[in-house]
Image (cartoon, rainbow, N blue to C red):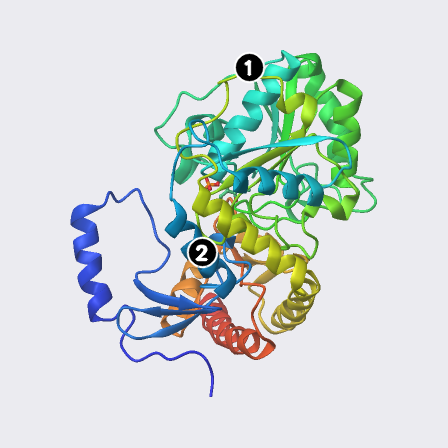
Amino acid sequence: MGAIAIRTDIPGPRSRALVARRTAAVPRGVAHSTTVFAESADGVRVTDVDGNVFLDFAGGIGVMNVGHSQTSVVDAVKRQAERFTHTAFSVAPYEGYITLAERLARITPGTFAKKTLFVNSGAEAIENAVKIARHATGRPGILCFEDGFHGRTLLTLSLTSKVAPYKLGFGPYIGDVLRVPYAYCYRCAYARSFPDCTIACVSAIEDHFKRHMDPQTIAAAVIEPVLGEGGFVVPPLGYLREIAALCREHGILLVADEIQTGFGRTGRMFACEHDGVEPDLLVTAKSLAAGLPLAAVVGRAELMDSPGVGGLGGTYGGNPVACAAAHAVLDEFERGDLLRRSEAIGVRIEARARAWAQQFAIVGDVRRRGAMVGVELVRNRDTREPAKHETDDVIRLACERGVLLIAAGTFGNVVRFLTPLTISDDELDEGLEVMTGCLAVASAAIAQR
Ligand SMILES: Cc1ncc(COP(=O)(O)O)c(C=O)c1O
């Protein structure tokens, strides 16, 4: 018997009642991709308030790499909550914060001396990375990339590259931002093809330096090693290395946004490792603490020490319960087989996605690094017209049939996989089978147009 159990219409009556209350009490700006309300979750399975059981292929947006309600995480959280939940690290500090900083220094790329700052969210961590880079270099500018996503605060929105819904009506944004194309080979900004292009999108940045911004005024390049919200865009190996070399040449600090790619998602602990790149500052969040709000900036000690005493911090940053959860997550990685499993999961999804590409013309591109797999859907393979509405239909149908999925991409036409890395092959196959049916429906709808 499979894991999925759909017992009511989706959404069921209790979820529908909550949708009505939610509409009255919560602003519409807080979006959700499904209308099923969670009651409990375990491993890869989410049970809703109507008793329906779903396979979670979204992992709370890449947060649950070690699985829902992982016993060691729950125990660590309980133990810490019984001791104390908060003193403020800036009032009465505690050892768990320091040990976690020590552990992150050990497992992030680079053997140089490092220090770590803990904050509450990915966006807050990016904000702090930019503050530290500006302080350390005395330069104001930031280099960022098209189709990148770095958060929803005003500074991170300035770096984020998607107007609707993220940026619409919230400006003005900070100046001193230079945005250049990412190595999005399926939609290459320079109409070139890899490998013949020899990754020309990096050398083209020199041209931007001449036309738009003096590199000597740029503090940092903020880059995702694989684009997350921007469509699970996997650049060619070597791309990040070339970006790192360009940064070194101009004295620009490299800030790797590993918020979505970190903690095993790409088959390595951090995605930078695929290219042998050691960023000056590495930003992480999401799967760091299995759902407790915690984010970190790990960086070269001398840079991290640049801001003066009191220049960094916040009331909740490095909350002791969140730190305890993160220790349990790191224990899971040390003890377990999660990195090997990440690659195996990705291989299995990719094999199925390549079969979809043979079967369904709607599949335009399949790309993968580790378990980070994106399937880009198009209305026409020649024009590559994004199949946004059809992607929405696939997500909705999948939910009705028991799989929680989310989309990505500037055009909203990429199905992304963020399953917990604890998923079994049987659970994976069951979810992929559901998706085959959903893609068949979406493909047929396009054929009938
Ligand atoms: C690559 C990346 N950077 C930054 C963020 C923002 O993180 P948060 O939502 O925790 O503020 C996200 C969130 O999806 C992300 O994927």
Counting residues from the N terminus, which is met first, the one under dot 1 or under dot 2?
2
| Quarter of the image where one finds residue 210 | top right
Q: Quadrant of the C terminus?
A: bottom left
Q: Position of residue 190 (x, y in %)?
A: 70, 36
Which sits in the foreground, 398 or 402?
Answer: 402
Judged from this view, the residue extending furthest toward the front is 83
Residue 177 shown left or right of residue 449 in the figure: right
Q: Is residue 52 left or right of residue 416?
A: left
Position in image of residue 231 (x %, y %): 56, 49
Q: Is residue 212 visible?
A: no
- The answer to whether residue 429 of the structure is visible from this angle is yes
Going 49% across and 64% down the picture, which residue do you hit? 70
**Amino acid tagged 2:** Gly
Where residue 419 sits in the image (x, y, percent)?
53, 63
Instruction: Identify the residue shown where x is 43% and y is 63%.
Output: 395
| Residue annotated with mark 2 | 60
